[in-house]
């Protein structure tokens, strides 16, 4: 490291602009780092994926069979599972179904690794909940990284929508059984919702009140 004199003492020279840029880059890398669980049995495939993802700042876990992969998926919390469509102890689609939680959802984003000409497998995987697929024979580092990031973003949006729907359902149930009159109107002051409490207080049913001006 270059040195310079400071009040007679020799101290390391620090390139502050460079140091600042490195800190910013490190911060961006740490913020965008995603954990990926790869379940694939072929060493060559795992090596290609490993090089592509580690170069992109991903944190990678590896499993060579379905049994080990399912254990890692349960014991850890990956952002994405990269799943081979053929494994020595199970088909990828079977593993995908084994990942399914009691509520019918998957624990994280899933991207399927398929072979060339396996369009039927890719279609079946997407129907089963996978959010994307990558053809192994045309594996490209940037395409793979982009597919994983996109799948994780989609999964987060889907989970946020599910959470909002559950909250809305809970609120709707509370409103429905409330003894108080609870009414909602739009920007035009027309009635949008009208609960049983409002019907008891004002005498109009929800069918009669909905769409009419609140006045």
Image: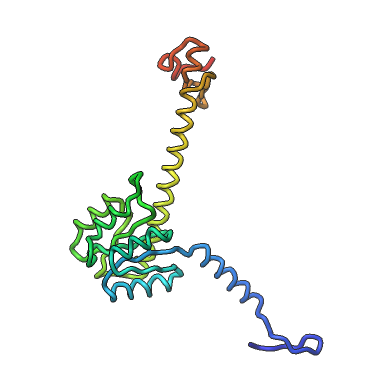
Q: Position of residue 77 (x, y in %)?
A: 43, 59
Residue under the image location 27 percent in, 64 percent down? 84
Q: Residue furthest right?
A: 7
Q: Position of residue 75 (x, y in %)?
A: 41, 60
Residue under the image location 46 percent in, 40 percent down? 164
Residue under the image location 43 percent in, 38 percent down? 165
Residue 131 can be seen, yes or no: yes
Q: Position of residue 90 (x, y in %)?
A: 23, 61
Residue 150: image quadrant is bottom left
Q: Position of residue 155 (x, y in %)?
A: 40, 52
> 67 or 151, which is in the foreground?
67
Tag count: 0
Residue 48: image quadrant is bottom left
> 85 or 66, which is in the foreground?
66
Horizontal arrangement in the rendering, residue 49 relative to residue 209 (left or right):
left
Residue 147 can be seen, yes or no: no
> 78 or 71, which is in the foreground?
71
Q: Quadrant of the N terminus?
A: bottom right
Residue 40: image quadrant is bottom left
Q: Is residue 89 above or below residue 11?
A: above
Q: Is residue 32 above or below residue 101?
A: below
Q: Residue furthest top?
A: 203
> 107 or 3, which is in the foreground?
107
């Amino acid at each position: 490291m270059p040195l310079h004199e400071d009040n007679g003492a020799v101290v390391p020279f620090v390139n502050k602009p460079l140091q600042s840029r490195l800190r910013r880059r490190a911060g961006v890398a740490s913020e965008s780092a995603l954990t990926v669980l790869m379940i694939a049995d072929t060493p060559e495939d795992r090596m290609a994926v490993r090089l592509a993802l580690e170069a992109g700042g991903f944190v990678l876990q590896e499993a060579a069979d379905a049994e080990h992969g399912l254990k890692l998926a349960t014991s850890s919390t990956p952002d994405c599972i990269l799943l081979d469509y053929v494994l020595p102890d199970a088909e990828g689609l079977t593993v995908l179904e084994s990942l399914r939680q009691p509520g019918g959802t998957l624990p994280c984003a899933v991207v399927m690794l398929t072979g060339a000409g396996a369009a039927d497998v890719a279609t079946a995987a997407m129907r089963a909940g996978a959010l994307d697929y990558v053809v192994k024979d045309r594996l490209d580092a940037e395409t793979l990284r982009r597919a994983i990031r996109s799948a994780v973003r989609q999964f987060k949006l889907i989970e946020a929508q599910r959470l909002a729907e559950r909250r809305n359902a809970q609120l709707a149930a509370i409103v429905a059984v409330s003894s108080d009159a609870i009414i909602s109107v739009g920007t035009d002051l027309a009635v949008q919702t009208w609960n049983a409490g409002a019907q008891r207080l004002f005498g109009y049913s929800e069918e009669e009140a909905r769409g009419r001006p609140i006045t």
